Every structure is written in structure tokens, then in C-alpha cells.
Image: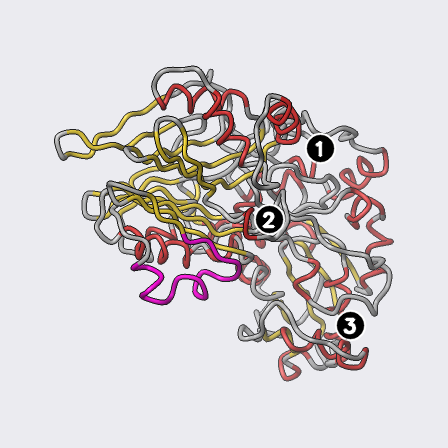
């Protein structure tokens, strides 16, 4: 996509006095896509849909519409509400068809020319595309396209799709579009708009999600079902892996075409949609994200419980897993950490003493719930460990007598190339430290991760089948589901394999 940016970290993960933003050590969201065809309020509905998908990216947002004669585009840096809350902005987006995008950069910097949907005038007319995912051959394609004379206007891998469609010699647009899809590798959920069609496409492994909805007889494509809920739309179904779906008008009736241009292959949806990315109220592949996260917590309690007084979630991502842990273990659940939702992502910190206080701007200890108690902290995942260390220290400062840390996912020991914001191996704590080293660094009395088989059992499987894994779990196992043309050196290291054994 154009949707992930590696964690910026000049700081050493062992330096406790760098980076006091607790959001700096979390997984970052990917991107959200939305499209609607045939509705007179297309722009306003798209803006609402992007509001619901804001958690998937907070760097920028954009909407492109078509009014039957010409295309209109509004692309802004910042949050959806900042960009599209004013009536005059929506009024500049007339038309009954629209595509929208909310972005967290994966490739390309945070600059306006990378904000999606990207748009180009092709021989047959305008073409806008919004992309969630990441192309693992994007750099290779870019070099080839530039070598053939393409003039790139952005640094986003998504732009390659525009050029591939433009350079195709096929006759019909959908044939050129499919030819472009056959040239790309990696993960993608695409929503595209022409002067006649709304097109959705999902990668052959189904790594990135895409759902179909309906509002007042008009088709909608969106990254998650929560975007349908906010506008009162009906969920119809998931777009299948490898499916291309096309909506167009014929005799004033919206028609649907379905193409399946790829040979069937076992789907490998991204497990992180359940662990972290999707909103808890979304349904992904027929499963409630909220219920799955509670099941992760319950399985974690089965595997690594110790005698404590309270279970405390790290808000907000650890809340469902902590509820599941508490329910299974019988240990009371307490909000031992209170999150301030009204603090932005940036804060001027002119002096080190003020930087030190920055950790408490977003998260504060609820002393009454934890003082004098043995606690288990539950979080969704661990990346660099800086956040976890600060939270453990906060709990001890608030009077906790023991602090045990549990992660509702396995240790992350491999980078991601499909749109998840993860640093390279050297920035992943679990890739460079043993379990005991991590525990000491974090300062917890004990540390444990959900096992890989336990993760699968929480998903209703007997365990992970190494020959045929059902999910894209490469961050834990190194088993990447697609070719990695632009990337090398992805084999698991001996230390990582031993850590996997420890966690299982």
C-alpha cells in the first residue's frame, strides 16, 4: 500500500530515558479503504466510513468522487475529522460514486503527494485507487516502469498499479486491471474508481481484509465491518481472496461482475487483524474480533498463570484479552491504568524534566486499584519493549508489590513486508533477547507470551499445521505467505528458533 512506516527509533531499546510516548512501542495501524457506488451522498458517506476506519491510519486521508462528468479530489494530511468535517469540503466532492482512504505510511513518506486515493487520467478516462497492504515487489516494479519511461509522481508503491494499468495493451479496462494485478506481489485490498465502475480486489492469499456492504441498494466496499455499521449499511459478505468485483450501471440498474483471475490457493489472512489491527466491534472472516481477543486472553491464562490479586489491561489494545484472562482464571479485573484519550500524538517537550512527564500524559496509574497488590499486566504484543518497561515502572511506583507481564500473542521475531509497521530484526526485542533477558529489561517479576499453538487453539484450530498454516503468522514463524522479491535475508536465526521453542 502506501501504508506502514517503520518505527522511528534512534534510541537504544535499553535506554530508559528516550522516547516517553507510550504509543512509540506499539504496532502501528495499516490503512483503511472505502468505496461506494450509486449513492447521491457518496462523499459524506465515505467520510463517515473513514471515520470508523481512523484506527487504521492517522497520518492522512483522502476522497475522490465522480459526478458523471469529472472527478473531484480532496486529500489532506491529518485526521479524517480535521479534513472532512466541514460542509464546504464535502460540497467540493459532488457525485454518486466515491473512494476514500485513511493512511499510515508503509512506503513513501508523509507528504501530500503520497496521500491516497491516487488518481491519474488514462487513455480511457480517470482512474483512482486506494490501497491497504504492501507490495513486496514494489521497488522492482518501480525500477522497471521508470526504465520504460514512466514518470512517477509519488514515492508510494501503489503508484505502480496506475502505471501498470496505463501501459497494458489489453482492450477492456477490467482486462488491463487484472493484468496489472497479475504483475504485483504481496498483500493488497484495493478499491478503485473509474468514470463507469467501482472495482474491488483482494490479494490471492486474502492477507488484507475487504468486505462488501449495501446501503439503499448501493454497493459499498470497506476494510472492516465497523465502517458499515457507522452508516447503517448491511453487511453482505467478505470479498474472497483473489476476487475482483466490479460494479457498473446498465439501463440505470447497478450490475455486478465477478472475476477470479488467479488459480485457487489456501487463504492466509493476517493474524494481526485479530490481535491488534481491526476494531474490536468488527467481524473478520465471520469471527468477532472482540471474542477472539478474549479467547487469546483465556488461552494465555491456561498456559502461564501465576498467583496474583488483580488482572490489569494495558489500554486500550489489551482490554479484551485481559477480560478473557480474568474470566478464565477467576482473578478480578481492574482498570489499573487509565488512558487519557484527549492527548494528541505530538507534544512539545522543551526540557528533559517535561519529557519525563510525557509518559503520564496518556497513561496514568490507578493507585487505588493496584497499591499493595500483586498484578498481571496484559497487552496485545511486544515490539521494542520500551513501553512495557515504562508501564512496569509506573505500576511499581503506584505501589504494586509484584508485576507480572503477559502478552496475548507470540514473540515477534521477524519483520513484516505486508503493511504492518515493524522495524527490522535489530529493532525487535524478541529477535535479539532471550525470554529472561527481556524480563530483566522490562523489570517484571515474570514474563510470558501466548504460544503459537495456543494462538491457533484460541482461533478454534487444534494447533498450527506447519505444512499448511491457516493464517499469515510470519512475524512469529518466518513462514511468509508470498514471494519477497524486494527483500532478502528472511531466514529464521538460531536464537529466534530457540525463543519460539521457549514460547511454545
CA distance separating discs 3 and 1: 32 Å
Q: Which residue is mark 1?
A: 478
390 shown above or below 171: below
Q: Residue at x 36, y 67 (%)?
A: 86
Q: Residue 165 has which mark?
A: none
Tell me whether circle 3 and circle 1 mark residues in contact (CB < 8 Å).
no
Q: Residue 393 has which mark?
A: 3
Residue 86: in magenta span: yes
Q: Residues within 10 Å of mark 3 (few under 14, many from 20)?
A: some
Q: Which residue is mark 2?
A: 105
Q: Residue at x 40, y 26 (%)?
A: 243
The residues colored magenta run: 74-91
CA distance separating discs 2 and 1: 23 Å
Q: Residues within 10 Å of mark 2 (few under 14, many from 20)?
A: many
Residue 213: in magenta span: no
Residue 370 image point, x, y percent: 67, 78
Residue 448 image point, x, y percent: 73, 53
Give the quadrant of residue 384.
Answer: bottom right
418 shown above or below 65: above
Tell me whether circle 2 and circle 3 mark residues in contact (CB < 8 Å).
no
Give the quadrant of residue 59.
Answer: bottom right
Which secondary structure lies at badge 2?
Answer: loop
447 or 25, which lies in front? 25
Amino acid at each position: 500500500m502506501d501504508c506502514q512506516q517503520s518505527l522511528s527509533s534512534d534510541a537504544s531499546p535499553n535506554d530508559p530515558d528516550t522516547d516517553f510516548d507510550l504509543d512509540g512501542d506499539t504496532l502501528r495501524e495499516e490503512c483503511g479503504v472505502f468505496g461506494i457506488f450509486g449513492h447521491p451522498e457518496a462523499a459524506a458517506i465515505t467520510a463517515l466510513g473513514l471515520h470508523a476506519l481512523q484506527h487504521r491510519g492517522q497520518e492522512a486521508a483522502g476522497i475522490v468522487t465522480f459526478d458523471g462528468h469529472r472527478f473531484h479530489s480532496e486529500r489532506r494530511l491529518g485526521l479524517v475529522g480535521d479534513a472532512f468535517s466541514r460542509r464546504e469540503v464535502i460540497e467540493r466532492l459532488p457525485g454518486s460514486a466515491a473512494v476514500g482512504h485513511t493512511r499510515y505510511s508503509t512506503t513513501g513518506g508523509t507528504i501530500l503527494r503520497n496521500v491516497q486515493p491516487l488518481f491519474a487520467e488514462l487513455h480511457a478516462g480517470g482512474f483512482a485507487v486506494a490501497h491497504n497492504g504492501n507490495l513486496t515487489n514494489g521497488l522492482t516494479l518501480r525500477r522497471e516502469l521508470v526504465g520504460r519511461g514512466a514518470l512517477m509522481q509519488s514515492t508510494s508503491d501503489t503508484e505502480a498499479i496506475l502505471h501498470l494499468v496505463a501501459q497494458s495493451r489489453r482492450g477492456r479496462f477490467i482486462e488491463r486491471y487484472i493484468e496489472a494485478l497479475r504483475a504485483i506481489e504481496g498483500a493488497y485490498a484495493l478499491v478503485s474508481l473509474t468514470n463507469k465502475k467501482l472495482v474491488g480486489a483482494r490479494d490471492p492469499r486474502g492477507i488484507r481484509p475487504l468486505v462488501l456492504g449495501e446501503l439503499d441498494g448501493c454497493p459499498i466496499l470497506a476494510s472492516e465491518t465497523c465502517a458499515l455499521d457507522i452508516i447503517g449499511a448491511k453487511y453482505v459478505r467478505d470479498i474472497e481472496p483473489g476476487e475482483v468485483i466490479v460494479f457498473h450501471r446498465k439501463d440505470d440498474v447497478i450490475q455486478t461482475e465477478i472475476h477470479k483471475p488467479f488459480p485457487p490457493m489456501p487463504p492466509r489472512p493476517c493474524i494481526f487483524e485479530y490481535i491488534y489491527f481491526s476494531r474490536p466491534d468488527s467481524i473478520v472472516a465471520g469471527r468477532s474480533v472482540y471474542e477472539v481477543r478474549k479467547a487469546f486472553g483465556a488461552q494465555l491464562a491456561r498456559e502461564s498463570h501465576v498467583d496474583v490479586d488483580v488482572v490489569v489491561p494495558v489500554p486500550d489494545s489489551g482490554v479484551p484479552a485481559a477480560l478473557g484472562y480474568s474470566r478464565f482464571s477467576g482473578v478480578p479485573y481492574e482498570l489499573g491504568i487509565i488512558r487519557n484519550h484527549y492527548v494528541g500524538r505530538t507534544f512539545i517537550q522543551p526540557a528533559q524534566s517535561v519529557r519525563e512527564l510525557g509518559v503520564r500524559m496518556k497513561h496514568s496509574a490507578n493507585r487505588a486499584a493496584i497499591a499493595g497488590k500483586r498484578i498481571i499486566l496484559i497487552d496485545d504484543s511486544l515490539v521494542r519493549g520500551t513501553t512495557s518497561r515504562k508501564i512496569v515502572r509506573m505500576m511499581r511506583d503506584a505501589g504494586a508489590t509484584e508485576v507480572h507481564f503477559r502478552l496475548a500473542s507470540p514473540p515477534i521475531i521477524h519483520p513484516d513486508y505486508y503493511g504492518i509497521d515493524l522495524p527490522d530484526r535489530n529493532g525487535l526485542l524478541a529477535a535479539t533477547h532471550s525470554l529472561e533477558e527481556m524480563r530483566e529489561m522490562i523489570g517484571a517479576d515474570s514474563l510470558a507470551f501466548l504460544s503459537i499453538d495456543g494462538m491457533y487453539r484460541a482461533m478454534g484450530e487444534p494447533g498450527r499445521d506447519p505444512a499448511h498454516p491457516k493464517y499469515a503468522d510470519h512475524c512469529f514463524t518466518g513462514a511468509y505467505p508470498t514471494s519477497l522479491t524486494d527483500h532478502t535475508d528472511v531466514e529464521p536465526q538460531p536464537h529466534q528458533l530457540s525463543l519460539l521453542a521457549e514460547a511454545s
